[in-house]
Image (spheres, helix red, strand yellow):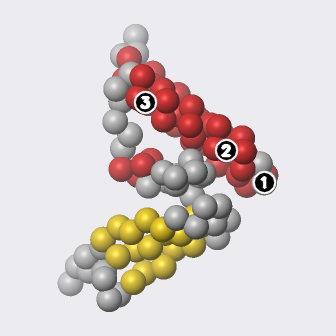
Amino acid sequence: MLSKNEIVEKRINILFKLGEEELRKGNSERTKRYIKLARKIGMKYQYTLPRELKRKFCKKCSLLLIPGISCAVRLNKNTKTRDIKCFNCNYIRRYPYVRKD
């Protein structure tokens, strides 16, 4: 029998996959709805989204971020950050990166 967290994790992953399929078809409103549902399920069952899922959507407009389709990714070598710009709301998220030698 699956635990509560495993069920929640599976459902959230399914919603993210459906959102990606819909965004590739060009239906951004349905994608936003899927992401909002996934976040709502996570909040209801107190499930923390993993880092890779948190970085897959815009926190302002809940659009799934796919480079070239819904966002632009740039590396800023002055501030050592990866800048992700959402095409829908023009919100820019910055994540630090460290070069390993």
Marking on residue 42: 3
Circle 2 residues within 10 Å: few <14, some 14–19, many ≥20: many
- Could you tell me how far apart the alpha carbons at marks 1 and 3 are, in whole angstroms? 26 Å
Q: Residue at x 72, y 41 (%)?
A: 30
Circle 1 residues within 10 Å: few <14, some 14–19, many ≥20: few
- Could you tell me how far apart the alpha carbons at marks 3 and 2 are, in whole angstroms? 17 Å
Q: Residue at x 58, y 67 (%)?
A: 90
Marking on residue 26: 1
- Could you tell me how far apart the alpha carbons at marks 2 and 1 are, in whole angstroms? 9 Å
When the figure is inspected, residue 95 is found, relative to residue 45, above or below; the finding is below
Near-viewer residue (27 or 87): 87
| Type of amino acid at the residue the image marks with label 3 | Gly
Marking on residue 31: 2
Question: Which quarter of the rendered picture does the N terminus lie within?
Answer: top left
Which of marks 3 and 1 precedes in the sequence?
A: 1
Which of marks 1 and 2 precedes in the sequence?
A: 1
Marking on residue 11: none
Can residue 64 be seen? yes
| Type of amino acid at the residue the image marks with label 2 | Thr
> CB of mark 1 within 8 Å of CB of mark 3?
no
